[in-house]
Image (cartoon, grey):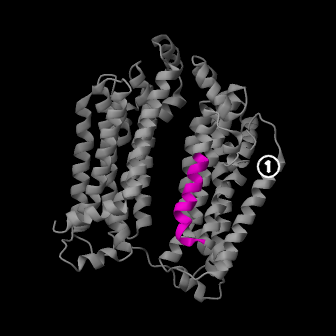
Amino acid sequence: MTGAGQLARLAMRRDRLMLVVWVYALTAIAASGAYALRALYPTAAGRARFIASVVYNPSLTFLYGQLHGTSVGALTVWRYGAFGAIGAGLMSIFLVIRHTRGDEETGRLELVGAAAVARPAALTAGLLVAVAANAAATLLIGVALAFLGLPAAGSAAFALSIGGCGLVFMAVAAVAAQVSGTARGARGIAIAVLGVSYLLRAVGDSGAASGLAWLSWLSPDGWVGQVRAFGGDRWWVLALPGAATAALAGLAFALAARRDLGSGLIQPRPGPARGGELLRGPLGLAWRLQRGSLAGWAFGYLAVFAASGAAAKGIGALLGSSAQLRQAFERLGGQAAITNAYLAAVMSLAGLGAGAYATTTVLRLRSEESAQLAEPLLAAPVGRIRWAASHLAVAVAGTAVVLAAAGLGAGLGDGLRTGNVATALTSLLGAALAQLPAALAIAAVAVLLFGVLPGWCVPGGWAALAVAVLIGLFGPVLRLATWVLDISPFSHVPRLPGGAVSAAPLAWLAAIAVALAAAGLAGLRRRDLA
């Protein structure tokens, strides 16, 4: 383990901003959720009416899991436990792969390995950083919930279950970093395991009456609910993530000792001697590079928004016990009709997520430039604008596909529950695609920065999305000033279904996106690469 401590300190220094953001976000989600639920349902009678509508709604059980208890703490675990576990898992995946396979792919570990550094040191350092991040999140979540007046034992059990899930996916990421030869592939493997874990938990919880409850025990995400914090505090369940982490981490070290530096256990397949017609131009290459990511986003959107649409039928009964929550949904969705307000809020969330997909796709340009993959392509008869435009075309088409998947999923979920599939599909598909100009306007900010200030395109692009997310989620509820709400392009999208349709704001958003992208492409023509 020689050098592991120094590498861990270096990794902590490199990630000092990222770690603060992740830990704060995980703590804020749990603490703000507990505070809101306590304010919305302060009495036992109000919680009982709310819980009565939750228990018999399989769609909500699919999304959030089973509810164990009637206290504010139990409601907090039900509402935020599954998604807190996903957040901790994503944090661990990104941290571990960044400091293992990511550094190995860029050649940094080969340079470090020339010094007096043991071979497992980089993997150990990555694991230490992830352990520290999960420990900090666990401590702060437990303290925050106890400070809000929730029982200390339940707060500790809930916090430890979230941290335990993060540690499991830390170890999953460590194994994925040995299996795949690229950081992108390792992240894909680990995130796929995270998605399967969520689906196992969702199917097991929603299908418990059909004998499928055992599936939840196969999922680290499901172990968060099985701890039953604030509803019995089954401490022994916390041994499961501990054992899984130890086994997977040991496997990662064993695999790391058996492979060559710079390679993965799964070797890439050699390509054909001649490329197909699709690879005769940069557009085909961009599509081939991005198709896996698009498939994952589309499938995930289809599944998540199908469950969200299916929950629309009972949303009136669900919110009937809380006038504050009903008003919040009405402000977020834009209409007084509660079902339409709920569906409009769901479509707004779909638009924000699509903005994240579009930004990720656009920033692939910067990653190719930084990795010097753009230079060989531009040495061929391919201009800069044509190269960049190929990725932008994939971003535009892919964002439309992702939003269409959200609309189709929500339409099928709502239509099958209400018995009017055709109307629901048409309505919600249109509502989802109405978010397209706003999502592309967010991505166009990253295009502009890529062309003019390439060093700021990654933080600037994600900052633009973060501002839109904060305004979209909290602006209407907090009743911020109109000029603040207008900063986000999503504030100008018609609130559909049920709202008034106006083409003018959509046309203006599309024009702004085109103008920003054009300015970015003009800057790309004039600056030096890399």
> Residue 58 location, x and y as percent?
52, 28
The residue lying toward the viewer, choosing from 196 and 488, is: 488
- Measuring from the top left, give residue 97's x and y in whole percent: 36, 62
| The quarter of the displayed image where residue 183 is located | bottom left
Residue count near mark 1 (Cα–Cα under 10 Å), binned few <14, some 14–19, many ≥20: some
Question: Where is residue 324 drawn, in percent x and y?
Answer: 59, 22
Which residue is pictured at 36% across the width and 57% down the height?
16
Q: Is residue 175 left or right of residue 340?
A: left
Q: Is residue 146 above or below residue 494?
A: above
**Disc 1 residue type?**
Pro
The N terminus sits in image quarter: bottom left
Horizontal side, residue 59 vs residue 392: left or right: left
The residues colored magenta run 453-469
Which residue shows up at 39% across the image and 75% down it?
106
Residue behind mark 1: 505
Residue 39 visible within the image: yes
Q: Residue at x 34, y 50 (%)?
A: 169
Residue 206 is situated, as x and y percent measured from the top left of the image, at: 47, 31
- On the rendered structure, is 450 left or right of 144? right
Quadrant of the rendered image containing residue 379? bottom right
Does 322 lie within the magenta span?
Answer: no
Secondary structure category for the residue under label 1: helix
Whether residue 227 appears in this view of the structure is no
Say which residue appears at 29% left-offset and 79% top-offset.
111
Count of marks placed on residues: 1
